[in-house]
Image: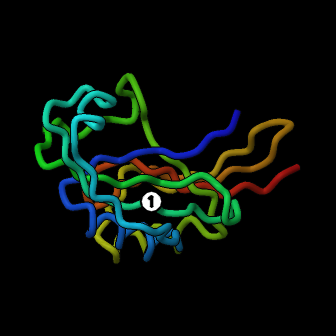
Amino acid sequence: MKYVHTNIISNDWEKLVEFYIKTFECTMVPPIRNQSGEWLSRGTGVKNAQLQGAHLLLPGHGTDGPTLEIYQYSEIEHQEIINPNTRGFGHIAFEVEDVEKTLHTLETNGGSRSGEVTTKIIEHVGEITFVYARDPEGNLIELQHWKKD
């Protein structure tokens, strides 16, 4: 068994792909996806499903690592922005060298902070510095840095 990807459905897949490439040094995995047809509708359960998007290789895992799949359906159902404590998928996380610096880069590239940069010693584990932020479409991202015991 192998973990392969996490999917984000976007209002503007090209803009969101650019954000993740600029902010987290993700790299595009060709080809650009442009999919539709009965097979997609059957597999997703979405009537007349049509989507476009791309896979981004996540940093730190090599060329066979998991990807972030960013798709845009031709018809999108909108939802409210979720809070960190909303049931279901909550956030994706990136371990970074410098939380403050990465947060600044995230904000420069169109994202926003959700919480405050916080540091806490976790007994028998180490010290974590982290913050929750949002990508330009409001999806939650955790930025974290560990100093291990």
Name the image quarter holding residue 80: top left
In this rendering, is residue 147 above or below 1?
A: below
Q: Residue at x 36, y 55 (%)?
A: 70
Q: Nearer the viewer, residue 95 or 29?
A: 29
- From the viewer's perspective, tell me whether residue 48 is left or right of residue 92: left
- From the viewer's perspective, tell me whether residue 25 is left or right of residue 72: right
Q: Position of residue 45 (x, y in %)?
A: 25, 26
Instruction: Say few, some or many: other residues with alpha carbon within 10 Å of mark 1 (under 14 / 14 to 19 / 20 or more).
Output: many
- From the viewer's perspective, tell me whether residue 119 is left or right of residue 37: right
Q: Residue at x 20, y 30 (%)?
A: 46
Q: Nearer the viewer, residue 11 or 118?
A: 11
Q: Count all numbered tags in the image, as a single digit.
A: 1
Q: Residue at x 20, y 61 (%)?
A: 12
What amino acid is at disc 1?
Answer: His
* Residue lying furthest top: 87
Q: Position of residue 31 (x, y in %)?
A: 42, 67
- From the viewer's perspective, tell me whether residue 60 is left or right of residue 125: left
In this rendering, is residue 62 above or below 133?
A: below
Q: Residue at x 26, y 57 (%)?
A: 52
Q: Position of residue 100 (x, y in %)?
A: 52, 69
Name the image quarter holding residue 37: top left
Q: Nearer the viewer, residue 54 or 126?
A: 54
SS for callout 1: strand
Q: Position of residue 107 (x, y in %)?
A: 35, 70
In this rendering, is residue 106 above or below 33?
A: below
Residue with the mark numbered 1? 55
